[in-house]
Amino acid sequence: MAPVQPPLSFNPAGIELDRRLGLARQLYQALRQRVLDGRLVSGTRLPASRDLAAALAISRNSVVRAYDQLYAEGFIEGRVGDGTYVANLPTAGTAAKKLSTKVSTGFSTGLSPGLSTKRSFSAEDCAPEVIHNAAVGRLESNHLPVPPSGPPRAFRVGVPAFDLFPFEVWAKLNAAFWRKPDLQQLCYGDPAGDERLRGLIAAYLRSSRGMQCTAEQIVITSGAQQAISLCAQLLVAPGDTVAVENPGYRAAGHAFAIAGAQLQGVAVDHDGIDCAALNGLDDCRLAYVTPSHQYPTGVVMSLARRLELLAWAERTGGWIIEDDYDGEYRYSGAPLAPLAALDRSGRVLYVGTFGKVAFPALRLGYLVLPAGCVEAFTRRRAVDVRHSEVSTQVVMAEFMAAGHFQRHIRRMRRAALNRRNTLLAGWPVDVPGVGCLPNVAAGLHLTVRVDSMAREQQLLAQARAVDVEINGLSSYWLPGSATAPDQRAGLVLGFAAVPEATIGEALARLRLAWQV
């Protein structure tokens, strides 16, 4: 009988921490990098938090916080009674080894890729006449619902608690800008957006997401939807196959269809988009995903699946559009590191928005791009809108620089958590045909399964009758999906749009309507 091999042990030698900066964050980044580049292989046993703290001469709390974030992101795992180990992640011959192991700055800086899967970008591509609208039939069969208008109400999806936005602070900053504007700012500006705002966004993403990006990689957009549309215009040639999550964000698919794409819906399981199915698609060179909180199922993409997806992009020369629409809302630990922070080959385009932490009508979003793509995206945007409205960018920059933005995010996260808890506590139980509520660790909405399409439609009609707004999960699927209709049924509920008292009143009306 072969002897049992003892687990590999970790030697902390070589970890250098700058005591002037956040020690927990530095330790987390150092350990994560060692897992990604193979210096810490799956199954390696890590020291107890007290022992590692002593070895590095730092507080145990710093080690615990670093370990907690690594646990949350799936880099390490605990074994009951046996300590902490590096998780079983893709290793040699699979996804992780297919990724480059060079030290990453977050994005490749020397990459100059063609901006279509079939042709290189040229000046002519900026001409409006090359934007393809030949997918009319496809769009008719892929009808895009118009977002609901009017004041927020329970349980509207995609709306944050903008009743808590500090409008007085915003008004003062806005008035200060217009009281004595910089005349230079009133001229035609940089199509990429206000330089100061781009720098502050880059700094925010470095601290909150671990993305080592620069202001030069950021292009300001009129919300996330324009960012997605720019990606569609520049990365998709007519006839290209584009993979989208199914169910998923239908407005993104709409943008790709306008550009002439052939949409391929890819199933989502408990780890995120099905990479095995993605690998089986012929000539697919672009995937649109929502890994931090899948829209609409709420699944958080696992680390192993993230590495598989990045390996797919590097192997095929494909692009990944990562929509981090509500990544600020995580209810335990820090937000998870996005795909863009793990990217080693410049294949991820990161979409961010202020609409989910401020209010949708702000129409302010951004793209974080591989360096080789920035010029083309800036030129394309210059053709479309020249540049964003100036005062909004300048005021947001001052809002961030003065510390209001971070305070507001903390307040919004607390409010969303309280509103989530109110929904979970008051949800009518034992409704016939309705599954159990899921655990909700992130985001602004949740999805609960229903056993049939007929039952979904009945529940939605009863909710509308008592003035409660709920979306049907069936509306998020692509037309012609292979999944059986009854397996597409469910209820999608936003929980952040209105205060707790209003949520309680809506739940009472639902209980009456559903006769629970």
Image (cartoon, rainbow, N blue to C red):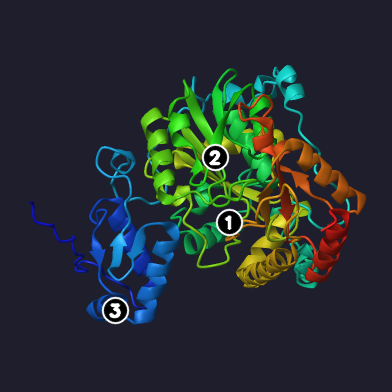
Q: What percent of the width, then of the height, locates residue 229?
A: 65, 35
Along the line of sight, the residue nearer the viewer: 61 or 390:
61
Marking on residue 327:
1
Residue type at mark 3 is Ala
Look at label 2 and name its amino acid. Val
449 is higher (above) or lower (below) than 121 = below
Bin the neighbour count of mark 2 within 10 Å (Cα to Cα): few under 14, some 14-19, many 20 and up. Answer: many
First-in-chain label (1 vs 3)? 3
x and y percentages locating residue 271 in the rendered image: 48, 46
Between label 3 and label 2, give the one nearer the viewer: 2
Q: CA distance from mark 1 to mark 3?
A: 30 Å
Q: Give the SS element for disc 3.
A: helix
Determine which residue is flagged by label 3: 53
| Residue at the image position 91 percent from the left and 54 percent from the top | 466
Picture disc at residue 268? 2
Badge 1 amino acid: Gly
Q: Residues within 10 Å of mark 1 (few under 14, many from 20)?
A: many
State the residue at coordinates (50%, 65%): 334
Q: Are marks 1 and 3 in contact (CB under 8 Å)?
A: no
Quarter in which the C terminus is drawn: bottom right
